[in-house]
Amino acid sequence: MAERRVTVQTEVGLHARPAALFVQAATKAPMDVTVGRPDADPVNAKSILLVIGLDVRHGEEIVISAEGDGADAALDEVVATVTANGA
């Protein structure tokens, strides 16, 4: 299983536009993608409601995981949506 621990850099965290971009990137992946806080159960990263429900804020760490062929490349795309300041 591929996994990334990242600090959310988007100013509003995983809310509104950044959450939508995050979910769009996760949805492009052919495998299941999950996201969550390091100390909590992960949720489906392809669900906008579940992602927004995490209430992740700027500067918080999240864990994004995927398993299968192409998981590393898929995670790279998903991670890019939360590590960019401009979203």
Image (tube, rainbow, N blue to C red):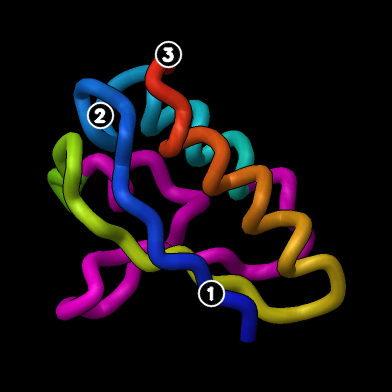
Q: Secondary structure at mark 1?
A: strand
The segment highlighted magenta reads 27-52
Confirm or deny contact between disc 2 and disc 3 (CB under 8 A): no
Q: Mark 3 highlights which residue?
A: 86
Determine if the magenta segment contains residue 32: yes
Q: Residue at x 50, y 67 (%)?
A: 4
Q: Mark 1 = which residue?
A: 3
* Residues at discs 1 and 3 in contact (Cβ within 8 Å): no
Q: Nearer the viewer, mark 1 or mark 2?
A: 1
For this orientation, the residue located farthest to the bottom is 1
Q: Is 16 left or right of 78, judged from the image as shown?
A: left
Disc 2 is placed on an element classified as: loop
Pointer 1 or 2: first along the chain: 1
Looking at marks 2 and 3 on the same chain, the residue that comes earlier in the sequence is marked by 2
Magenta stretch: includes residue 30: yes
Instruction: Give the alpha-carbon distance from disc 2 to disc 3, as whole Å.
Output: 13 Å
**Residue extending furthest top?**
86
Q: Amino acid at mark 1?
A: Glu
Residue type of the residue flagged with mark 3: Gly
Q: Earlier in the sequence, mark 1 or mark 3?
A: 1
Marks 1/3: CA–CA distance: 24 Å
Q: Badge 2 local density, few (<14 within 10 Å), some, or many (20+)? A: many
Q: Residues within 10 Å of mark 3 (few under 14, many from 20)?
A: few
Q: Residue at x 38, y 40 (%)?
A: 48
Quadrant of the image for the C terminus? Answer: top left
Q: In the shown orientation, is residue 54 left or right of residue 64?
A: left
Residue 87 located left or right of residue 21: left
Q: Against 70, is 60 above or below?
A: above
Rendering quarter of residue 74: bottom right
> Residue 84, relative to residue 52: is it above or below?
above
What residue is shown with label 2? Answer: 15
